[in-house]
Image (tube, rainbow, N blue to C red):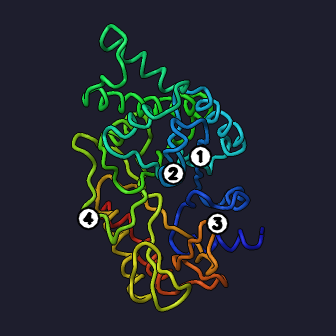
């Protein structure tokens, strides 16, 4: 692994890249040669175990297990907390926050002894000065409590970052695209050091934050695949050839550099996935290298070309 890790660092520098994204092999990060970040996934008691969305159910941020899991995850990364090459951590991945009342609906469907339900009862009593039945809630109530739960989620994470990892960045939750509920972004912006989005599109020319939000933005994942070489599946954003793929890479990075909010983009992923698939069957041709560790020359040259001039593009020097 030391030989391969050395090669990875030398390649990244040669390819004009300056950070390593989440899910990088820890021993390669620990070589302290390229700035890196990682991801924490909070697997605590969910609001509603049956309401799994994308990867897992939304956690109950009022349940004590939520804060305890944040603490455990951070404290387990003791070496990283002291590593000056570590930028910070994403927390969670692609939560589908749903409609402006989706989180409240999850709370209403939670078991009767769920902490979020106790929080809802208390919130309704404070709001109306008396106990209110759940089936008497108005649409306005549901919208408001939806924000209460999201606020509790972000604020609790922020508190533990401030206490345990004050020198590291809280890199957000890697929104899966742009959420349909803009309140999630607005609330997240209050507590995260930057907002992170996994966006699979050809470029970011149409990206915009909700009105009134001015925050640094990081792309946690993007990729392009092609049909002409490598595994048979070209990933989430398709191109016809490796030449087209390289052109799309440059255009995506160009669109980020030209947008005032973007501070970086992370490619997904270093090498192609196996044709037999990963744990969930995903078998994309989206690497900088193929499964034999041979670089895709076209994409690598595109990365090197635009990566070497991104600061001049942004600052005009």
The CA span between labels 2 and 3 is 16 Å
The answer to whether 117 is drawn above or below residue 270 in the figure is above
Q: Which residue is mark 1?
A: 41
Against 239, residue 138 (above or below) is above
In terms of sequence position, does the residue under pointer 2 or pointer 3 come before the other? 2
Residue 33 lies, in percent from the top left, at 65, 60
Left or right: where 138 falls relative to 22? left
Please state which of the two labelled residues, at mark 3 or mark 4, is closer to the viewer.
Answer: 3
> Disc 3 and disc 4: Cα gap in Å?
33 Å
Q: Which residue is mark 3?
A: 279
Mark 4: secondary structure: loop
Q: Quadrant of the N terminus?
A: bottom right
Horizontal side of 58 relative to 201 (left or right) equals right
Q: Nearer the viewer, residue 16 or 25?
A: 25
- What residue is pinned by disc 4? 205
Quarter of the image holding residue 123? top left
Residue reaching furthest to the top: 129
Which numbered tag is attached to residue 93?
2
Q: Nearer the viewer, residue 305 or 173?
A: 173
Relative image position of residue 101 (x, y in whole percent):
33, 37
Dot placed on the residue nearer the N-terminal end, 1 or 2 = 1
- Mark 2: give few (<14), some (14-19) or many (20+) Cα within 10 Å: many
Of circles 2 and 4, the one toward us is: 2
Question: Between marks 3 and 1, how big is the CA–CA gap?
Answer: 17 Å
> Of circles 2 and 3, which is in front?
3
Q: Are marks 1 and 2 in contact (CB under 8 Å)?
A: yes
């Amino acid at each position: 692994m030391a030989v391969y890790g050395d090669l990875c660092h030398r390649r990244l520098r040669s390819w004009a890249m300056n950070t390593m994204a989440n899910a990088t092999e820890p021993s390669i990060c620990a070589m302290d040669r390229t700035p890196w970040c990682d991801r924490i996934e909070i697997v605590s008691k969910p609001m509603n175990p049956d309401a799994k969305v994308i990867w897992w159910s939304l956690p109950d941020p009022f349940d004590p297990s939520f804060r305890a899991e944040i603490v455990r995850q951070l404290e387990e990364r003791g070496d990283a907390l002291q590593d000056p090459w570590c930028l910070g951590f994403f927390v969670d991945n692609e939560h589908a926050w749903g409609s402006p009342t989706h989180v409240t609906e999850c709370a209403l469907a939670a078991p009767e002894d769920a902490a979020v339900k106790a929080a809802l009862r208390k919130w309704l009593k404070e709001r109306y000065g008396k106990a209110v039945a759940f089936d008497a809630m108005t649409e306005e109530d549901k919208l408001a409590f939806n924000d209460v739960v999201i606020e509790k989620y972000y604020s609790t994470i922020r508190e533990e970052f401030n206490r345990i990892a004050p020198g590291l960045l809280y890199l957000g939750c890697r929104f899966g695209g742009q959420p349909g509920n803009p309140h999630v972004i607005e609330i997240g912006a209050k507590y995260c050091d930057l907002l992170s989005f996994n966006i699979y599109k050809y470029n970011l020319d149409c990206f915009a934050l909700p009105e009134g939000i001015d925050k640094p933005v990081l792309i946690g994942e993007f990729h392009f695949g092609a049909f002409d070489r490598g595994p048979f599946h070209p990933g989430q954003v398709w191109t016809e050839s490796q030449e087209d793929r390289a052109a799309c890479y440059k255009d995506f990075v160009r669109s980020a550099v030209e947008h005032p909010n973007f501070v970086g983009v992370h490619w997904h992923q270093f090498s192609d996935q196996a044709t037999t698939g990963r744990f969930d069957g995903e078998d994309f041709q989206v690497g900088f290298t193929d499964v034999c560790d041979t670089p895709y020359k076209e994409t690598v040259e595109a990365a090197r070309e635009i990566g070497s001039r991104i600061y001049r593009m942004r600052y005009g020097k």
